[in-house]
Amino acid sequence: MSLSRALEAMLLMATEPVAAADLAAALEVPEVEVTAELEAIARHYADTERGFELRRVAGGWRLATAEDLAEVIEAWVVSDQRSRLSQAALETLSVIAYLQPVTRGRIAGIRGVNVDGVVKTLLVRGLISEAGEDPHSGAMTFTTTSLFLQKLGLDSLDELPDLAPLLPDAVALEAELTMLVGEQPVSDHPQEDE
């Protein structure tokens, strides 16, 4: 197994900076060796002028887009030409629409995946907004916006279709959703969404 390839794969899946010590422990390799390899990878990306880079931030390492491409990325994310939402974004938006105000943790618990990136995309597109802190957990809650209503051609959330006729065994699902709304998520680190 190539240390470089393993580190790249692990960092690609990481949602937060990862300490060299944690990477070394996971790969059962000395930390000094991992640090040297991370520095070599970072130099390689810089030398070959990739669209991404390996950065040391917040006590760890993470992959990020190249800083000089920030305007390109911003234009691409907010572009009207990219108006189609991914399946993950549509599912997340649906959870928010029906359960709002709802925390990121509850959304992730219901979907079973990490929704950080999807929530950021929905915020940038103006389809959801931060709605204050949850009184029980202190976590930020999210609601849909007037742009969401406009894009769906709705006057209010009361016009959202009832879920029951659209789903098999809707009574059981509604009971499960009601139970989930009343519970905290089991894990703070579900799998990353695509």
Image (cartoon, rainbow, N blue to C red):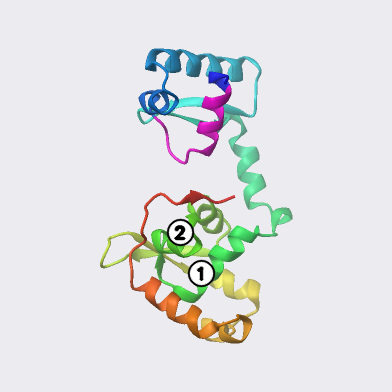
* Residue 65: x %, y % from top left: 57, 33
The earlier-in-sequence mark between 2 and 1 is: 1
Mark 2 falls on what kind of element? Answer: helix
Residue 3's disc is none
Left or right for 125, reference 28: right
* Residue 147: x %, y % from top left: 58, 69
Q: Is residue 108 visible?
A: yes
Q: Is residue 162 visible?
A: no
* Residue 14: x %, y % from top left: 48, 38
- Mark 2: few, some, or many residues within 10 Å (few <14, many ≥20)? many
Figure quadrant of residue 155: bottom right
Left or right for 3, reference 179: right
Q: Amino acid at mark 2?
A: Ala
Q: Residue at x 42, y 18 (%)?
A: 29
Image quarter where the N terminus lies is: top right
Q: Residue at x 53, y 14 (%)?
A: 40
Report the residue marked by disc 1.
Answer: 95
Q: Is residue 14 above or below residue 92?
A: above
Mark 1 falls on what kind of element? Answer: helix
Residue 108's disc is 2
Q: Is residue 42 above or below residue 122?
A: above
Q: Amino acid at mark 1?
A: Val
Q: Residue at x 58, y 29 (%)?
A: 66
Q: CA distance from mark 2 to mark 1?
A: 10 Å
Residue span colored magenta? 5-18
